[in-house]
């Protein structure tokens, strides 16, 4: 492995992936400065969390000039497809352009990792799965378009001499995930049913869609190894390589529940207006160049997710 850096700047550090990556870096004795809109301007030992809006160009430039990070991991993004279109482009595209420009001018030796999304790939045909990094983009939402554009902006910066690594991460699962995502939404409903806080009914959308789920802790390790062992200018899929339907996800969680005979009820409000039938990725390149591969079993991810929501439901009462 290459020599570890002294410091890392993580945008979106207080979020789902950001919190795990922060913990991993700190365990590796990497000094971390975190950036998030929900930050508290707190500092504890080798960790500092700054409250900062990435659209504030002056604040971004000031922080990069001050901290001079060896690594910058850009996780922050607006992920809600229903968000105003102007906000999606302002946060995911234009803020990224400003961030990369600031790094180029103020910390040119920094290596940047831009965390993209499998949503960029959009609709694929059966023969295009598993998806490689050469797959063409066919995004179907404005969110996906902004992530595809962010990826292209990163590629342009790399071609201009900045050390940029791009990842395209598939569906993440694990403790701490927001219930805005289907995996956590199911787990929370089951935890509430177990505590008698709701009727034994799970409301669902499209259960036939097939996705590539990967534990958030494996995702954090993939980002770390991509930076430590990967090649600037390269693109890496971060995925499990296994396709599972949303039905399989739900059945796995229901099998872990202490309540039997939970009704599964379809809710038209939960149907995505532009759903992609199937997406399964290939992590062959990431494995070949960094040695990374998934380590956390599917069953463990489901169990840890459900246990997290059980504890959360109890603490919120």
Image: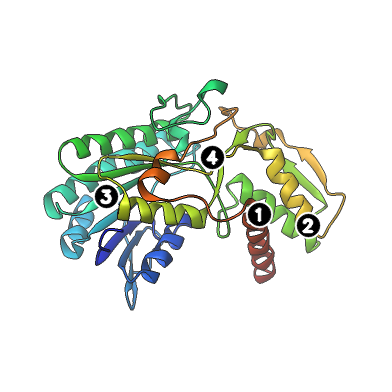
Whole-Å distance between the Cαs marked 4 and 1? Answer: 17 Å
Residue at numbered disc 4: 241
Q: Which mark is residue 47?
A: none
List the single residue furthest toward the left.
105
**Does the residue at mark 4 contact the one at mark 2 (Cβ under 8 Å)?**
no
Q: First in sequence: mark 4 or mark 1?
A: 4
Whole-Å distance between the Cαs marked 1 and 2? Answer: 11 Å
Dot 3 lies on which element? strand
Relative depth, front residue between 119 and 134: 134
Q: First in sequence: mark 4 or mark 2?
A: 4
Dot 2 lies on which element? loop
Task: Estimate how packed mark 1 is, as few (under 14), some (14 to 19) or many (20 or more) residues with alpha carbons within 10 Å.
Answer: many
Whole-Å distance between the Cαs marked 3 and 1? Answer: 31 Å
Which residue sits at x=39%, y=32%?
Answer: 133
Residue at numbered disc 2: 257
Residue at numbered disc 3: 112
Residue 51 position within the rendered picture, expressed as x and y whole percent measured from the top left: 34, 62
List the single residue furthest toward the right.
261
- In which quadrant of the rendered view does residue 160 lie? top left
């Amino acid at each position: 492995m290459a020599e570890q850096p002294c410091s890392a700047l993580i945008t979106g550090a207080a979020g789902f992936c950001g919190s795990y990556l922060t913990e991993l870096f700190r365990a590796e004795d990497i000094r971390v400065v975190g950036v998030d809109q929900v930050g508290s301007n707190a500092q504890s030992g080798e960790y500092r969390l700054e409250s900062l809006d990435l659209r504030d160009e002056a604040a971004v430039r000031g922080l990069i000039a001050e901290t001079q990070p060896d690594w910058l991991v850009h996780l922050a993004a607006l992920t809600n497809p229903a968000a105003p279109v102007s906000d999606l482009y302002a946060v995911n595209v234009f803020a990224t352009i400003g961030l990369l420009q600031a790094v180029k001018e103020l910390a040119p030796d920094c290596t940047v990792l831009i965390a993209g999304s499998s949503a960029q790939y959009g609709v694929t045909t059966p023969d295009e799965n598993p998806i490689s990094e050469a797959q063409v983009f066919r995004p179907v939402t404005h969110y996906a378009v902004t992530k595809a554009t962010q990826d292209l902006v990163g590629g342009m910066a790399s071609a201009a001499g900045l050390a940029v690594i791009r990842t395209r991460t598939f569906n993440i699962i694990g403790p701490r995930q927001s219930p805005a995502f289907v995996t956590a939404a199911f787990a929370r409903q089951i935890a509430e049913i177990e505590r008698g806080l709701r009727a034994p009914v799970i409301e669902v959308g499209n259960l036939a869609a097939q996705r590539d789920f990967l534990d958030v802790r494996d995702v954090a390790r993939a980002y770390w190894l991509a930076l430590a062992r990967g090649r600037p200018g390269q693109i890496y899929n971060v995925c499990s390589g296994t396709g599972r339907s949303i039905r399989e996800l739900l059945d796995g969680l229901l099998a872990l529940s202490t309540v039997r005979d939970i009704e599964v009820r379809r809710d038209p409000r939960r149907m995505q207006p532009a759903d992609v039938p199937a997406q399964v990725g290939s992590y062959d390149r990431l494995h070949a160049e960094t040695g990374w591969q998934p380590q956390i079993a599917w069953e463990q991810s489901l169990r840890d997710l459900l246990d997290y929501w059980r504890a959360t439901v109890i603490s919120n009462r």
